[in-house]
Amino acid sequence: MPPFLFTGSRRTCVQAGSQVTLRSRRDRETRSVATPAKPLPRSIAARLARLLLAAVLAGILFALAAWAWRQPFLERPRALWELSRMPPPSSLPVPVQGVAPGQIAATFGAPRGADREHAGIDIFAARGTPVSSTTRGVVLSIRERGLGGRQVWVLGPAGERHYYAHLDDWSPALAEGDVILPGTRIGTVGNTGNARTTPPHLHYGIYGEDGALDPLPRMRAAR
Ligand SMILES: [Zn+2]
């Protein structure tokens, strides 16, 4: 390779470097004369460092949130969030132990007195027969009042509320706010409330956004 070519290109580099140096020094002089009080803009390196720091902090916060979301103290908000995103179940088990869907009368919507309709179904069984939740859910209320007597309300998938009424007793392990699963014991069949003159049975109702829904078709859909 001829040596002058190498020398030539090297000189060009040196010259180019000098030009850059000269130009930038002149720029600095011009700027300092034009705006003497203004601080210099942050360098790109400082901006990158800030961006990197922000990204690291965001990563740490995200990891903390992901960790906290799995902890037991956030079980209820997590369950409520997951339940709200679930579709309404198309099939449901019978909540009373030992009863088949075919044994349940289709009385949803039947007249009850002069101004009321039956807003659920009645599942007859011996007093004390176990009653279990049909769905995953969060226990909204455990109380004794009005027509339903001893009752439990469970918030299930898709915002539907499940109503278990006329219970003889509640499951001692159950508490309001509990996150429960299908099959979790709720109580036992009884005839509390306005059922006290009838044989023991569970009144079971489902309430959606637009009111009462018939649970029986979903039980018949269950295999
Ligand atoms: Zn009923």
Image: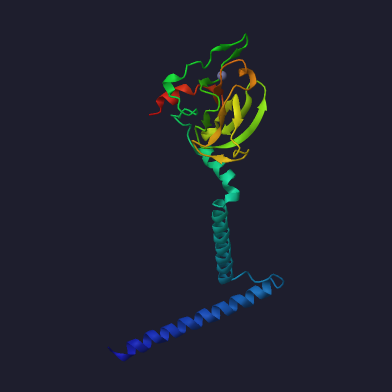
Extreme residue toward the top, this view: 114
The x, y position of residue 34, in whole percent, is 67, 71
Taking the spot 45% from the left edge, 25% from the top edge, the residue there is 99
Q: Where is 95 relative to 176, above or below? A: above
In depth, the one of 60 and 99 nearer the eye is 99
The x, y position of residue 184, in whole percent, is 52, 37
The x, y position of residue 191, in whole percent, is 60, 21
User: Would residue 78 be found to the left or right of residue 33 on screen?
Assistant: left
Taking the spot 55% from the left edge, 62% from the top edge, the residue there is 55
Taking the spot 55% from the left edge, 66% from the top edge, the residue there is 52
Q: Give the quadrant of residue 100.
A: top left
In depth, the one of 215 and 38 nearer the eye is 215
The x, y position of residue 123, in whole percent, is 51, 22
Location of the C terminus (image quadrant): top left
Quadrant position of ligand 1: top right
Extreme residue toward the right, this view: 37
